[in-house]
Structures are given as C-alpha cells and as structure tokens.
Amino acid sequence: MPPKKPKSAVSSAGSKGKGKGKTIQSPTPSEKPNHPEDIYPMVLTSATQELFDCSADEDVTGENPYKLLKKDYIIQDIKTRAAVSDFSPVKQTVLDYPEDEILLVYDRDFTYGQSFYLVLTPEAKDRILNPPEPETPEVFLNEVNNKTPEPKQWISLGSEQEIEEESVKETREKLRYKFSRIRRKFGVPVCFSDRNTADAKDGYLECASYQDSRFSIKQMQRDCGMQAVPRLWCSSAQTQWKFLRNIFTQYTPRELSQGEKENILQSESLKNFCKAVTPRVMQALQQEEIMNVFFDDWKALGTEAEGSDWSGKVSEGLMLYQAFTVQKYNKDKKISSINWHPTIYGVIAVALTEKKEERLNETLVVRPSFILFYSFSDPTNPQLLLECPDDILAFEFCPSDPNIIVGGCVNGQVVLWDISAHVTLLEGTQPSGKKVSVNTDTFDLDDNKENKTPVVRYCAVSALESSHKAPITDVRWLPQTFEVTRTGLPVENKYNISVQVVTCSPDCSLMFWDVRVPKLLSHSASDRKQNVNQTPQISPYSVPDTFKHLDRTWKPLFRVSLPKINTSGEYAPLKFSLEHYTCNGNTGMNTEEAHEHDDSSKVIPDYSQLRVPSAKTLTTLEDVNTKLYIGTEDGEIVYTDWKLEKDDSGRLHSAKPLHCFNIHHCMVNTVQRSPFFKDVILTGPSLSGNWNFAIWKESVTDGPIILSPNSEHMYTVGCWSLSRPAVFFIGKDDGSIEVWNLLEKTSEPAQVHAHVTNAKITCIIPWIGSAKQHFLAVTDDLGMVRVFEIPRTLYIPSRSEQLSMRKYFELEEERLVDFLKRDEAWAKQRKEAEELKKKTELNKPAKTLEENEGENKKVYNDYLTLEESILKGMGLLPATANTQDI
C-alpha cells in the first residue's frame, strides 16, 4: 500500500522540527552484535507507522507480527524524507534487495533491542514466514505419558521425633523357657495312632483366656488416627476375607512442569483443536439462547394427557416461565395485590406498598406510589405506571371495560384510573403483534421524556372525609347483571355494565360506591345531546375526564357496619366474597329491548355519559343473593347480609351477622369462591400467617365442611384453579407452594414445590393464556413477580371431575352433620353421667369418725410395708436388734 505522502510527510517533518515525536536512534549492528546478520533492528516513529500501516498493537500484534512492505514505497520514502526517514540507515541494502517486497517484523518483546526489525535477505524472509514443522505433539504426549515418575527428595519437617515417641519399645526382660526330654526316648521309632484326648493326662491342654478379677487396667487415653471412613455397603462374594488389615494410601497429583505446560499451550494441535471446536460451541450457545433445546416435544403434543386420570399420577411440577422485577420501583417494597389484564395476552399489573418497618422509618421522605404493568415481551421494564395518591392494597379491572381500574388506598380513599389512551401501547407488547407508537405524554415535570415509561394519573379519588378511616384491604366490582339502591336492595341494571364498587376496611365497615354521574350533577337535555357522540376529552395534564364528576367529591352510596353477634363492638373485615348473579339482568324488558341491550353491552361504555336512574323505575330482583362471607383481622369468618333494615323509628341500620366462626388463628387474607361451585368458599391463609385453611359451603351453617390439619409453616395466601374443580394452590411463608387435589388426597397436599421464592409469598393468581397454556403468578415480600407454567396434569380435568367434586362436598356435608349429632349425643351422655354421679354421692351415707380413722390407719400401714420392701431391695434397711448383739 503506498504511503500517504504529501500531508503525512509534511506533518512528520513539521512535528520533528517543533521537537515533537522524538525517537531514540536505533543502534547500529556493531552496537548489537547478538542479532543475526540478515536482520536489522530499528525504531519506527508513529508517523512512519501510519505511513506504512504498521502501527504497533493495531496493524501488527504479537500474534501477527509480520508486515510486507513494497520496496518502491520504501525507496520513495527515503527520497522524500531524506535523512528524516527511518529507513535511511539501510538505504543501500534496500536498493540491493532482489525482490519487490521486504519483510518487516514487529518485535513486541524487544528480543533484539528494538520494537521492529527489517529482514535483509530473501532466505531469512522464507525462514521466518515458513518455519520448519515442530515435532509432532502425539510423540511428545506419549513421551509425557511414558515418563517414569521419580520420587522427590525427602524434606524433614520434624516428624521423626513424633514417630520415635509413638513407636513401641521393649522395656521388660524377656522370659526364658527350657524344654527337655528323657534320654531313653531319644531315637525311638515313632508310631502314630488315634486316641482320645481324655485318655492321656497330657494328651491336650487348652489354655483358655479369662478375665482376672484380681486387678483391672483402666484405659485412660487412646490415640487413633483416621483419614477416611468407608461407606457401609452390603455385598457378597465367593471368597472369604479372613485377614483384616488397616491400610491407607497417600498420593500426590502428578504435575507437569512450567515448561511442559507452555509447550502444550503453544502446540499447533491445541490451536487446531480450538479452531475446529469454537464454531460448533458458538452455534450451540446461539441455539440455546434462541430456543430451549431440552423442551420435550412429545409431551407438548398432548398425546398422553388425555389418557391420564384425575389422580394426576403423571403430573409434573410448576415450571418458571417469566420473572419480573425493577429495582428502581421495588426497592424496600412488597407486592400487595396482583391482577392479570382480562383481554391482553401476557400483561400483568402489580401494586407495590411500603413495608411496615420502612413506613415507620420514613417520616420526611415521600416516595411515589405506582401500579406497574409488566409484559412477557419485556420483563425488565414496566410498560405502564399508574400514579397513586397513596399505597394501594387492592385493585381490580372493571369486568365491562378493562380500561377502567378501581383501587383502594392505605389512607382509605377509593381511586379510579382510565388507561384507554394507552391500550395500543399494551397491545403492542404482545408477541404476535407489532409495536405501535402512541402518544405517551403524561403528567410529568421533567422535560426529558425519552425512554421513559408512561405514567397515567388517576381520574378521580373519593372525598377524604367520606372515605374509610383505615386502609382499604379489598375492593370488588359488582357484576353487570344487577345494581343496588341506597338501602342495599338489588335491582335490574338497565345499562348492563358494571357501575358499582364494594370496598371493605378494618374500620368495621363495607361501603358501596357508584361511578355514574349523580342526579344533582346531571346536565340539561341539550347539553346531554351535545355530548352523546363525543369521546372523552383529555385535560391539559393528560388526565381523562371520564370520572371528572367524581374527583374529590365522590361519596359512598351506603355503608354496611358489622356489629358483633353476642357482644358489643364490631367485626373488622379484611376480605369478602359475594356471589355472582348469573341472570342476564333484562327483567321486565321485551325481546327487542333485551337484544338492544345485549348489543350495546358489547360496545365499550362511556362512563362520563351514564346517569344514576331513579330507583322507582327499576325492577327489584328477588333471586339475587345479598349475603356474603367476610374474613376479619381476628381470624373470624362472618356470614352476613348487606341489605339495610329499618328499626322501630324507621331509621336504616345494618343487621347483625347470621353466623360467625372463629376457625383461624389470625388475620384472614383469602376469601374466594370456587369458579365451579358458587356456594363453595376457600378461606384461611393470611399475610401474617395461618396454620390451616378451611372450605365452606354456603348452605351449611354449622361450620366448615373441610378443615385442614395444622401445617409446619404458616399459610399466607390461597386460590382455586380456573380449570380443575378439585385443585387449589396454597402459598406459605417459607416461599413454597402446595398443590392440593381433593380427589387424590385430603389430609396432605398432592405436590409441594419448595423454595419457589426466598421470601414470604404474598399473592397467587392463576390465568388462562390459551387452551394449552395456563399460568400461575406468584409474588413475594421482596417485590418479585414470578410466572410459572402449570403442567397439563394440573389444568386438564377428568371427564367427571366436577360431578365427583359435587358428590364429595355432599359427603363432607353429611359427615359434618353426623359428627355434630354425635357430638351433641356425647355431650348429653356426659352431662347425664355427671348428674348421676352427683346424685349417688348425695345418697351415700356418711361415715363415722372411727371408720375414717381405721381407713387412714390401714392406708398408713400399707405405706410402711411398701417402704420396707423398697429399702430391703436397695440394701438400706437398718440392722435388727439380734444383729447388734453379735
């Protein structure tokens, strides 16, 4: 390559004239006599290196130190730069060089005293570029393997003295025995014959060992060295091992010398092996990153799942599918509530709250509260943030419009969000869809919005003075099939959409809220017609005005208190469960009106245009179940009615609960109805920990039909399976999950998945992604979300599983009734026995004083006799009088 002549030459000369880029002159061959005659060590300045593209450690390196320079370029550089050229000392050699290219070698180790050397002859160039082949590595390896190990020289570390002290030395004088024979028997022929040992006196003498009772040697200390203990193993062989010996073996690894290691590392065979293997290893790593090579395609086909029975004998465990965590938002926080998005695949929302100790410590620092939206497509970054006025303990998506979300705050306020402007953003995160760019500008004081997660501000918040006085622990939307009046009476829902919310709090109350525009705020008919076809407007701060009519003026429709049954005071609810009314809610309509409402229900409603109708125009629904189960912070399960009653003065008040059972030990965190049986409820686990859980049936008022045994670790949360009636999941405080199958085992879980998390499990919620993909979301006390894929055996029910579970619940109900009857009979028998015993004691004649003294004296004599026998057995009885006379 020709050098860059004009500019580089001028700059090089100029830099040298200014005193920059000075280099040490290379020594002449006479100064360095230790290098071969056919090379010339030299120093190349940075300018020369740039001209000839031979920059050190860039163009030439220690692994590739060779550079072929054109002879004409070198001559041109000598003519242009004259004495400044680094090749001027070898000018004549270059001119006499016979070939067109001269070899320049980068000497990184300064073997010949300089950083470069120029090869002066073609023979030397061929010798350097084509070195002779070294000895084959196979022969070298055979020599290494056949090399006889030589013992190392003994180095004394002072162990001779220990060996000398531990060695056994003879200290006693040896005994001498003399054996003799009668002389006349010398040389006499010997005749052997059989005889009995008892016939002759000296025929046989056995010297059997025995323990001498005259003295005993007590072993005070024993030295026993041991390096390894063999494992016990039962085996058999044809030979007998008669001679037992204690042996040991010490060995040291045979190591190669440093020179041998360097030779192996620099061998061509090792380099060729690495070059041949590296592409295959890289391809395997790429395939592992792209897909799971250990995925079982045969099981994924589902050919054997249909043949499995309800017992789940071939079931597998939960498999981790995805994990979500963001340290920026999860630090020092825990997850209090979690919900899957009802319509968008792979989107999950979690609410974060401060831990108790952190909330107590932080008095001045106010950290923002958010609800985070995660997606399967991007687990490291949240897709959306819902700004909250305070920490959220419970929230839920609206069944009619998933874009509407209601939440309950720690300060007792109810919050509403509208995320309809960000639906395309969440839908763009689906694996099958494309990323759609949307306007994500939200209320944010920072001007730099690049690469920021959109933040959605709440649309409305309830009035603080009308809200709960304690944290809201549970919030639920009423079904779209009915609504309630101010007295709690269920009536028809003309809109056929969910418009009312129920909340509960430890302030001993439940509150019902209506999200529609109240009558007092209704606009005139002309304004209403003008706004019917308009979409919700966006305020200057990107807050939809969907619930602008409720912001900071929202008040509850009515309040339900929970007075205690037998004592004064009230119950403090934490969780509740109400029955979903399955009627279509079109009572009183003709067929055409019903069809119109069905069609209108498919359209996403505009809540800003809805008005609260008059209760007089609505039809009362008599078949709606207004009773609900409530779990309290004291571990009670309360069954009550939310309808208000009138007292003698005509004032409305809450009725006392119908039943109350104190089954659990502390706060109840789970009250959930079965998705298959509307009258079966699972209760028990709490964040503070419960040792058991219970299953109730609404028609049974005597207690739970199933009560689990106490667990070694406390239960924290539970949920039913969405596809199998007999299966439910229980989370524990040690981070494990129990899978219960009531058709397989009723006294213990069918599966236990230990160490799912390293902290206490706070929430568990299942979700059906598709017919062949079911998930279970698990959150812990550290703010981590883990999504597990449920195996086929845990979500594919048997053909008659629902019928079997119905029969099982009926049998448990009969068992409970029978047990209560027997318990009542046993209590009656015990009471009768106690009364009979009292009567017999009263009818028994009183004893005289002499009879009592006689009985006491007899008891005392028996005691003396027993004492004497015990003392005789122990040899402690005092001597008698006869013995003393002797």
Image (cartoon, helix red, strand yellow):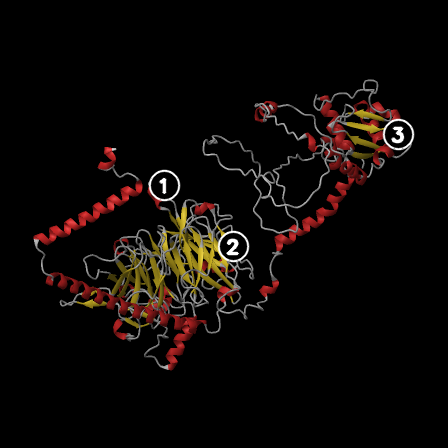
Q: Which residue is mark 2?
A: 322
Disc 3 residue type (three-letter): Thr
Mark 1 lies on a secondary structure that is: loop
- Give the class, few, some or many, for how many residues have Cα within 10 Å of label 1's Cα (few <14, many ≥20): few
Quadrant where the C terminus is found in the figure: top left
Q: Which residue is mark 3?
A: 121
> Which badge, 3 or 1, is on the more N-terminal residue?
3
How many angstroms separate mark 3 from mark 1 (CA)?
Answer: 79 Å
How many angstroms separate mark 3 from mark 2 (CA)?
Answer: 66 Å
Asked whether the viewer can see residue 9, the reply is yes
- Give the class, few, some or many, for how many residues have Cα within 10 Å of label 3's Cα (few <14, many ≥20): some
Q: Could you say which is closer to the camera, residue 675 or residue 209? A: 209
Marks 3 and 1 close (CB-CB < 8 Å): no
Residue at image x 9%, y 56%?
847
Q: Could you say which is closer to the camera, residue 736 or residue 537? A: 736
In screen coordinates, is 622 left or right of 711?
left
In screen coordinates, is 444 left or right of 828?
right
Q: Which residue is mark 1?
A: 365
Mark 3 lies on a secondary structure that is: loop
**x, y (%) of residue 288?**
63, 53
**x, y (%) of residue 791?**
52, 62
> Which badge, 3 or 2, is on the more N-terminal residue?
3
Q: Could you say which is closer to the camera, residue 840 or residue 141? A: 840
Asked whether the viewer can see residue 439, the reply is no
